[in-house]
């Protein structure tokens, strides 16, 4: 019997991984990092031109098989066609990273409208639910798979004027635990990754518009800095690989140590 090595257990080569919100920020880093590790990557966001361009760039730089396909996860009825197209192209889905989400403008609770609340929850909660519910049976039929829902440390505690975002991300953690419980018998695992401060478009904008803002954010971590999106790829690869085969229903904080 050939022994299983650590490199074998962390292997994601050949796995078909769907990533939403994959044309910028953390999602883009996940797509490039997994492609470099040998995965077949489905690059998705709302705009087809960005999906196609990003997928082509990944293939050019890594040689990996990619598919650029737009899908607005906030639109419930658009998701089945998206999943069907991925199945038609690759025949299977081994990993799903529900990364797409919106970080909306600050709104006081007394000024919150039903429409605005629903917009945030449609993208940050209903989208991951709908996509995972359609992908999980595909994973089951292929022998299993791994679903990773991207939450946020912002979901750990409500903040003034950010209730809609915090509540949606907190609810995503609970939803993931339900996914893990319901789909364990299918060998489909579901986990959460909750990032802290990463240098995404949002934080870059804050750095430009708020003098000293990045320093304040960095100072709220034990490591005293803001992370590069590439630093989150290792955890994602671990959760997609056999090295994490006994991990499901868990929330993995990656924040540099919150103070």
Image (cartoon, rainbow, N blue to C red):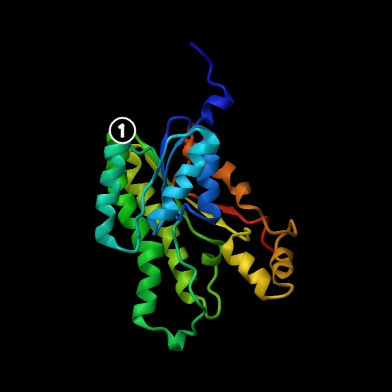
Q: Is residue 95 above or below residue 20?
A: above
User: Residue 64's spot in the image, x, y percent?
Assistant: 47, 34
User: Residue 210's spot in the image, x, y percent?
Assistant: 68, 75
Q: Is residue 7 above or below residue 246?
A: above
Identified at 74% across, 65% down, the residue is: 219
Identified at 67% across, 69% down, the residue is: 207
Taking the image as shown, residue 204 lies to the left or right of residue 79, namely right
* Image quadrant in which you'd find residue 222: bottom right
Which one is in front, 250 or 222? 222
* Image quadrant in which you'd find residue 204: bottom right
Identified at 42% across, 48% down, the residue is: 52
Q: Is residue 249 visible?
A: no
Q: Is residue 27 visible?
A: yes
Label 1 crowd (10 A; few <14 / some 14-19 / many >=20): some
Which one is in front, 138 or 104? 104
Taking the image as shown, residue 241 lies to the left or right of residue 76, namely right
Give the residue at mark 1. Answer: 142
Q: Please state, as top left, top right, bottom left or bottom right, where the C terminus lies in the image.
A: bottom right
- Judged from this view, the residue extending furthest toward the bottom is 110
Q: Is residue 47 above or below residue 8?
A: below
Identified at 54% across, 65% down, the residue is: 156
User: Residue 19's spot in the image, x, y percent?
Assistant: 43, 48
Q: Report helix, strand or loop for mark 1.
A: loop
User: Residue 225's spot in the image, x, y percent?
Assistant: 73, 59
Q: Is residue 256 above or below residue 212?
A: above
């Amino acid at each position: 019997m050939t022994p299983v090595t650590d490199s074998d257990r962390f292997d994601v080569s050949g796995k078909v991984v769907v990533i939403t919100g994959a044309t910028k920020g953390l999602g883009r880093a996940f797509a490039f990092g997994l492609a470099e590790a040998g995965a077949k990557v489905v690059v998705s966001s709302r705009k087809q031109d960005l999906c196609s361009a990003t997928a082509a760039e990944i293939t050019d730089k890594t040689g990996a098989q990619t598919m650029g396909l737009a899908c607005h996860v906030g639109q419930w009825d658009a998701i089945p066609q998206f999943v069907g197209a991925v199945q038609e192209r690759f025949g299977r889905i081994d990993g799903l990273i529900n990364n797409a989400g919106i970080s909306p403008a600050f709104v006081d609770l007394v000024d919150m409208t039903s429409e605005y609340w629903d917009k945030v929850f449609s993208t940050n909660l209903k989208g991951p639910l709908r996509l995972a519910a359609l992908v999980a049976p595909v994973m089951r039929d292929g022998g299993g798979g791994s679903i990773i829902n991207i939450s946020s440390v912002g979901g750990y505690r409500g903040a003034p004027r950010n209730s809609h975002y915090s509540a949606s991300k907190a609810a995503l953690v609970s939803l993931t635990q339900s996914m893990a419980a319901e789909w364990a018998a299918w060998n489909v695992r579901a986990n959460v990754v909750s990032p802290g401060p990463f240098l995404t478009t949002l934080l870059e904008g804050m750095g430009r518009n708020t003098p000293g803002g990045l320093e304040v954010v960095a100072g709220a971590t034990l490591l005293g800095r803001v992370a590069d999106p590439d630093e989150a790829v290792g955890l994602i690869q671990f959760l997609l690989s056999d090295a994490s085969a006994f991990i499901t229903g868990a929330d993995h904080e990656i924040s540099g140590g919150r103070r």
